[in-house]
């Protein structure tokens, strides 16, 4: 079942084209509301927690309506899958605990959450979500800093181009370690290691089960005004646990294991008190163990511009060209070109409005060429508009209302769809 959100607009250091399973740039939108509600339920409590609150429980409740839950092109296509109506209303109940503890120079952060999603019509999608994360922001003296931790998430799968009456849960595990050495007031050496594991509950989707190991090393020059410029090199390997089965008679077994290398430049320029530009770009090369015609070698880059129009209105723009992993059994990766613009307006200390517009072109260049199948490379165009409002009656209570409109057009009829939805949610941290 398809799902998506807008391209990220956070710190450029968080961009990772090696393993972007949850990357909004890779997933279409029809199940936006349920996943957004689940994520908000699990993390909004954390957002409301004050720094230094050692132990803070939270609860959340969300209601949503989506007029095209599965992202189908028409009612007729839905009937072919035994679906009479494309729309549904659902709710998410959540509860969890956030831990924030400073121990001398070390900072411990942890979160544990549970959620229950219930659909009015598509009851087969009812599911229990689980999420846990433990991280230590470590520091040794004044020159060595970094993070070490692990995370676990279990939720309804955001499969794309896959419709089933069965519930398909996806489990993600991650272990990470990064560090920086400030060996000179103006220079730092940094490195990062990550291991990601992904597994699906349905046997038909297990071709997407994989482990990805990533390593990165870089060096930065740091200026007095908090700007920086640097270079970095990265390597990752992807190991798929099961082969992809394709062909009219399931006669082909395709291994999607790959090795990826990249070399990039990184710029973080604080141009003024209102403007900040971030760039991460360079050359990426991905090689597959089988069907090497889908190997990729080319430029990958993302530019992020942050501008404070006033003290209360902020704008963020993204322009990018990236490859990444995708939850699709027909391709091992997609090549994505996109643009997005987001804005927030702090109307008062208790009310915030937001809006986001994005467009993206996805090419499934990771699809192997099999002469007997005579298939063409899939290509999608994706557009999304969303607006939202947050109201904070008290320091620990938030009420949110969000709406979205999504369109996707593809070079095959079943890939075209539109989807609209609205979500009302509230979260309270004790």
Image (cartoon, rainbow, N blue to C red):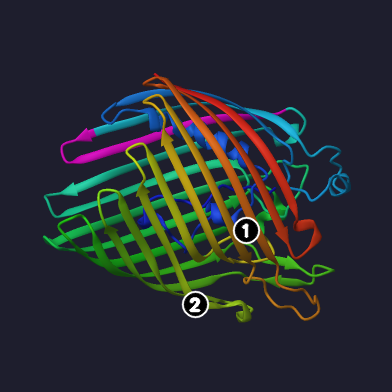
- Residue at image point 26% right, 32% down: 101
**Left or right of 247 on screen, residue 425:** left
Question: Residue at label 1?
Answer: 208
What secondary structure do most residues of the magenta stretch adopt? strand
Question: Residue at label 2?
Answer: 298
- Residue at image point 30% right, 56% down: 178
Locate residue 160, reporting x and y percent.
68, 53
Q: Nearer the viewer, mark 1 or mark 2?
A: 2
Q: Quadrant of residue 359?
A: bottom right
Determine crowd level at label 2: few under 14, some 14-19, many 20+ residues with C-alpha closer than 10 A: few
Q: Residue 147 versus residue 323: which sits nearer the camera? A: 323
Judge whether residue 183 is colored magenta.
Answer: no
Locate residue 162, reporting x and y percent.
73, 52
Q: Secondary structure at mark 2?
A: strand
Q: Is residue 427 above or below residue 202?
A: above
Determine crowd level at label 1: few under 14, some 14-19, many 20+ residues with C-alpha closer than 10 A: many
**Left or right of 214 on screen, residue 384:** right
Q: Is residue 293 above or below residue 121?
A: below
Locate residue 260, reporting x and y percent.
47, 72
Q: Residue 96 versus residue 200: which sits nearer the camera? A: 96
Locate residue 307, reporting x and y percent.
36, 50
Query: Between marks 1 and 2, how big is the CA–CA gap?
Result: 24 Å
Write the start and end of the magenta stretch as one range.
102-119
Q: Secondary structure at mark 1?
A: helix
Judge whether residue 105 is colored magenta.
Answer: yes
Q: Quadrant of residue 84?
A: top right
**Left or right of 185 on screen, residue 5:** right
Q: Residue furthest front?
A: 310
Task: Specify the label residue 293 is tagged with.
Answer: none
Q: How many marks?
A: 2
- Residue at image point 41% right, 30% down: 347
């Amino acid at each position: 079942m398809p799902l998506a959100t807008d391209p990220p607009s956070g710190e450029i250091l968080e961009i990772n084209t090696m393993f972007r399973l949850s990357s909004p740039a890779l997933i279409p939108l029809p199940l936006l509301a349920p996943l957004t509600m689940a994520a908000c339920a699990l993390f909004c409590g954390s957002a409301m927690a004050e720094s230094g609150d050692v132990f803070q429980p939270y609860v959340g409740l969300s209601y949503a309506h989506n007029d095209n839950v599965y992202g189908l092109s028409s009612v007729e296509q839905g009937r072919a899958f035994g679906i009479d109506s494309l729309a549904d209303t659902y709710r998410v109940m959540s509860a969890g605990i956030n831990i924030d503890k400073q121990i001398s120079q070390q900072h411990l952060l942890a979160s544990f959450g549970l959620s229950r999603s219930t659909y009015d019509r598509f009851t087969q999608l009812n599911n229990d979500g689980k999420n846990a994360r433990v991280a230590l922001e470590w520091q040794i003296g004044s020159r060595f800093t970094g993070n070490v931790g692990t995370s676990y998430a279990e939720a309804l799968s955001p499969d794309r181009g896959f419709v089933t009456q069965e519930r398909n849960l996806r489990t993600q595990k991650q272990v990470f370690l990064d560090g920086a050495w400030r060996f000179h007031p103006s220079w730092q050496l940094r490195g990062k290691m990550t291991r990601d594991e992904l597994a699906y509950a349905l046997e038909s989707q297990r071709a997407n089960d994989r482990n990805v190991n990533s390593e990165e090393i870089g060096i930065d020059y740091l200026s007095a005004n908090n700007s920086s410029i640097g270079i970095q090199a990265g390597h990752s390997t992807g190991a798929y646990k099961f082969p992809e089965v394709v062909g009219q008679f399931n006669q082909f077994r395709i291994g999607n294991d790959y090795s990826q290398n990249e070399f990039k430049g990184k710029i973080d320029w604080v141009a003024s008190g209102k403007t900040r530009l971030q760039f991460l770009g360079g050359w990426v090369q991905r090689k597959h163990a089988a069907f090497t015609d889908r190997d990729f070698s080319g430029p990958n880059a993302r530019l992020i511009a942050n501008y404070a129009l006033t003290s209360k209105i902020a704008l963020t723009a993204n322009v990018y060209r990236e490859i990444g992993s995708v939850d699709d059994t027909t391709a091992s990766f997609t090549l994505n070109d996109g643009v997005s613009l987001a804005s927030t307006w702090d109307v008062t200390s208790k009310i915030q409005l937001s809006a986001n517009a994005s467009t993206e072109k996805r090419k499934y260049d990771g699809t192997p060429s099999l002469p007997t199948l005579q298939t063409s490379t899939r290509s999608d165009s994706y557009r999304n508009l969303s607006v939202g409002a947050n109201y904070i009656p008290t320091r620990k209570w938030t009420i949110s209302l969000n709406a979205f409109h999504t369109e996707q057009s593809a070079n095959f009829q079943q890939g075209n769809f539109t989807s609209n939805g609205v979500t009302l949610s509230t979260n309270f941290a004790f």
